Image (tube, helix red, strand yellow):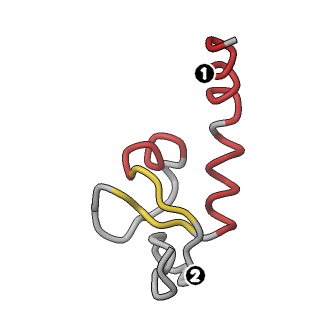
């Protein structure tokens, strides 16, 4: 991530650590208010952790199909 990137959640302002699809973030965390509507959204460590917790079961099922 570039050093000047900030979290795309309204009111957060922390340094971004990951970049994800805006569509996937909206599906997993509809309660978040995002800044703008770009294709990809930058998330800070805390918001990325929330995203991972909400999508854990889905990711486990995806991995199970490959085994």
Residue at 70% over, 25% down: 60
Which disc, if any, is residue 62? 1
What kind of element bears circle 1? helix
Which disc, if any, is residue 40? none
- 38 vs 35, nearest the viewer: 38
Residue at 71% over, 44% down: 53
Give the residue furthest to the front.
67
Crowd tier of the residue under label 1, counting other residues whose Cα lies within 10 Å: few below 14, some 14–19, many 20 or above:
few
Image height of 50 relative to 58, above or below = below
Residue 49's x, y, as percent?
70, 56
Q: In this view, does 67 lie to the left or right of 18?
A: right
Residue at 40% over, 50% down: 21
What kind of element bears circle 2? loop
- 42 vs 65, nearest the viewer: 65
Residue 19's x, y, as percent?
48, 61
Residue at 48% over, 49% down: 25
Which disc, if any, is residue 15? 2
Crowd tier of the residue under label 2, counting other residues whose Cα lies within 10 Å: few below 14, some 14–19, many 20 or above:
some
Q: Is residue 61 left or right of residue 8?
A: right
Q: Does label 2 or label 1 sit earlier along the sequence?
A: 2
């Amino acid at each position: 991530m570039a050093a000047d990137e900030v979290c795309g959640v309204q009111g957060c302002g922390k340094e971004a650590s990951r970049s994800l699809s805006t569509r996937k973030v909206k599906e997993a965390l509809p309660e978040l208010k995002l800044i703008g509507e770009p294709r990809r959204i930058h998330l800070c460590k805390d918001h990325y952790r929330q995203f991972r917790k909400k999508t854990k079961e889905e990711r486990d099922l995806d991995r199970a199909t490959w085994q």
